[in-house]
Amino acid sequence: DIVMTQSPDSLAVSLGERATVHCKSSQSILNRSNKKNYLTWYQQKPGQPPKLLIYWASTRESGVPDRFSGSGSGADFTLTISSLQAEDVAVYYCQQYYSTPHTFGQGTKLEIK
Amino acid sequence: EVQLVESGGGLVQPGGSLRLSCAGSEFTFDNHWMSWVRQAPGKGLEWVANIEHDGSKIDYVDSVKGRFTISRDNAKNSLYLQMNSLRAEDTAVYYCARGESSYGYILDYWGRGTLVTVSS
């Protein structure tokens, strides 16, 4: 199974500042034939189901604010929130869908400093 | 708007069985892969299983293989998870999620979940 490891486990950032979450896979999740990275990012607020933010590592889901961006390739990925808003307080998860089981990272809890 | 509503959760004894259902609406159900994802209390997300549009391709996480069965009834716009030989470690909120139309492994809509508690 592909192991997904996120860092840090928790993060406190001031409003308006940049927040960065890292995700590392135990093997490459880049399909060299189509040049796509099989990685999604989800946001989960307390008491709510997860919400899709980013897929193919860097494609923003429709309706997601452009302060959210994804980057990286191969086995190292980053979710960046360019200017933290109060409503961004949540747990963020990466997930690989390169091979089953489609494993998630352990989550990163983002709070306001 | 797309809706996914899970039902069937509850308290069950170890070794018991439970059948979860997920009703989809406001989208063409048989155009989409569907998945189950679970979350133990206070823990992270765990992918459990998925099923192709017509049920022809199915995958499970190893920890549920041989105990859980995912299925769907496209005529009823419904997804199911039959859970047998339940263990304490199966205690979780179980979410039903829709696969994105262009690539079914991307989970673009999620239900609110149903809680399964396995305890004596």
Image (cartoon, coloured by chain):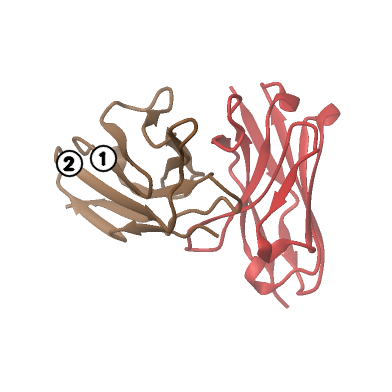
Chain colours: A brown, B red
Between residue A98 and residue A11, name the one nearer to us: A98
Disc 1 crowd rating (10 Å Cα; few below 14, some 14-19, many 20+) is some
Q: Secondary structure at mark 2?
A: loop
At 17% from the left edge and 41% from the top edge, which residue is drawn? A18
Whether callout 2 and callout 1 share a subunit is answered yes
Q: Quadrant of the N terminus of chain A?
A: bottom right
Image position, residue B34 (x, y; %): 68, 38
**Dots 2 and 1: beta carbons under 8 Å?**
yes
- Marked residue nearer the N-terminal end (2 or 1): 2
Q: Quadrant of residue A27?
A: bottom left
At 39% from the left edge and 37% from the top edge, which residue is drawn? A57
Parent chain of label 1 = A
Disc 2 crowd rating (10 Å Cα; few below 14, some 14-19, many 20+) is some
Q: Amino acid at mark 1?
A: Thr
Image position, residue B54 (x, y; %): 80, 32
Q: Is residue A61 above or below residue B95?
A: above
Residue position for label 2: A18
Q: Secondary structure at mark 1?
A: strand
Image position, residue A73 (x, y; %): 35, 41
Return the residue found at the far front: A33
Parent chain of label 2 = A
Q: CA distance from mark 2 to mark 1?
A: 7 Å
Residue position for label 1: A80
In the image: residue A80, left or right of residue A4? left
At 21% from the left edge and 45% from the top edge, which residue is drawn? A19
Q: Quadrant of residue A70?
A: top left
Between residue B29 and residue A27, name the one nearer to us: A27
Between residue B69 and residue A97, name the one nearer to us: A97
